[in-house]
Image (spheres, rainbow, N blue to C red):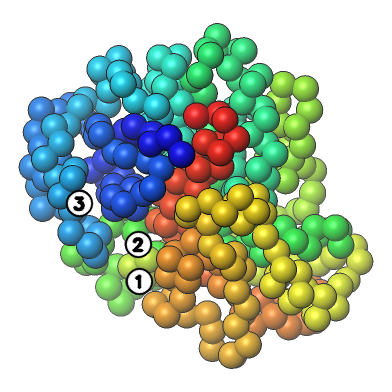
Amino acid sequence: MKKYKVGVVGATGMVGQRFVSLLEHHPWFEVVKLAASPRSAGKSYREALGGRWAMSTPIPESMADLVMYDASDVEKMAEGLDFVFCAVDMKKDEIRALEERYAKAECPVISNNSAHRFTPDVPMIIPEVNADHMKVIDAQRRRLGTKRGFIAVKSNCSLQSYVPALAPLKDFGIKDVLACTYQAISGAGKTFETWPEMVDNVIPFIGGEEEKSEKEPMKIWGSLEGDEIKLASSPSITTQCIRVPVSDGHLAAVFVRFDQKPSKEEILRRWHEFAGEPQRLNLPSAPKQFLTYFEEDNMPQTRLNRDQEHGMGVSIGRLREDNQYDYKFVCLSHNTIRGAAGGAVLMAELLAENGYL
C-alpha cells in the first residue's frame, strides 16, 4: 500500500488534535504538514498549541516540531500533499470557500466541517452506512473542473450513535424517530479546565445541533440520482440535544416507530450481524464489531463504553417495547473519534481503497 502524505488543516483545535493523535502510527497516512490560523504560522506545532493540548496521550514527537502553515495559504499548504483533513473554526461561507480552494488546487479535502454537508454533489459518508455515495465525487470533479480534487464530508457527531443503530432496520419501514442526545463538552472544543461552568451543570441547548440531527440523516439515507444526492423523504425525525458534564462520548435515547414492527430478537440479530464496506475491506480503522449490544440494564455508560473498538464502535442497550412508539433503546459513540476525526480517517481509508485518493 502506498504511503499517503497528508496535512491537517485546523490542527490546533480539539478535532485537529484528535486527527494528529490518531494519525501518529497510521499504516497508510503520514502527516507531513499542519496548518491553522495566521497567528500560528511559522511556529512549531508545540509552540502554536501553547499548552492547549487536550488529548490523553502526549503530542506525537514526529509532529511536535513541524512548522505550522497558514491554512489560508492554500498553494503552499497543498504542495506535495495527497490530501488534507480539515477541521476549522470559521464562518460557514469562509469554510466553503477555503475547502473549494484546496479542492481546486487538486488537493482532496476530507472534512469534519458542516459547511458543505448539503452541497448536492458532496458526499456525506458514514462508511458502514452509505459508502456508495462516494460515486458522486465524479460529478463534483466535473463541476469543479478538477482531476483529483474534491470534498467529502462527515456528518455531525450527534447522529453517529443512532443512525448506525437504525441503518440495519430500514427495510422494516422506519416511520418516526424521536432522539434525545446527551452530548459531551469536547463536542464544543472544551475541557473542564477551559469550561468550568459545565461542572455540575446541564445546558438544554446546543446551537444548530437539533437541525443537523434531524436533517443530516435524510442525506445519509438519500439516493444518488444523476449528478447529485437526493434527500430521503422519511423517516420523520425530531430531536432534543443537551450538553452534559461529560468529557467525551455522546449518548442518545431513541424511540422508533415502524411500518412493519420487527421482533426484538430480529433487531438484536441485525445489530450483531451488521457490517459494511470498512469491515469487508478490513480497513485499518474499521471496528471489527461495529454495533455492540449490552444486556445489562445500566449499560452502555459513557465512561465505560465510549472507547468501544478503540472509539470506533457504537454501543447499544436497553432495547424494549414502548407504549407510544414501537421500541426504545439507548446508544453511545465517542464524539471526537467515531463522531469526528476517527470517522473522517475511516472515510479517507475507504476513498483511498476505492481509488479516489
In the displayed orientation, state which residue is furthest to the front: 1
- The answer to whether marks 1 and 2 mark residues whose Cβ atoms lie closer than 8 Å is yes
Residue 216 sits above or below residue 239 on the image: above
Q: Amino acid at mark 1?
A: Pro
Residue placed under numbered mark 2 in the picture: 185
Spatial CA span between label 3 and label 1: 28 Å
Residue, x 37% and y 41% (percent of image)?
Answer: 29
229 versus 268 height, above or below: above
Classify 10 Å Cα crowding around label 3: few (below 14), some (14-19), many (20 and above). some
Q: Which residue is mark 3?
A: 60
The residue sitting at the right extreme is 260
Percent position (x, y) of residue 1? 46, 39
Residue 325 falls in image quadrant: bottom right
The answer to whether residue 181 is visible is no
* Residue at (40, 29) in percent of width and height: 83
- For disc 1, the marked residue is 245
Q: Give the mark nearest the N terminus, 3 or 2.
A: 3
For image coordinates 46% across by 76% down, the residue present is: 305
The kind of secondary structure element at disc 2 is helix
Label whose residue precedes the other's in the sequence (3 or 1): 3
Residue 292, above or below 115: below
Please identify, in this view, whether the residue under mark 3 or under mark 1 is nearer the observer.
Answer: 3
**Along the viewing direction, whichever of 200 and 47 lies nearer the viewer:** 47
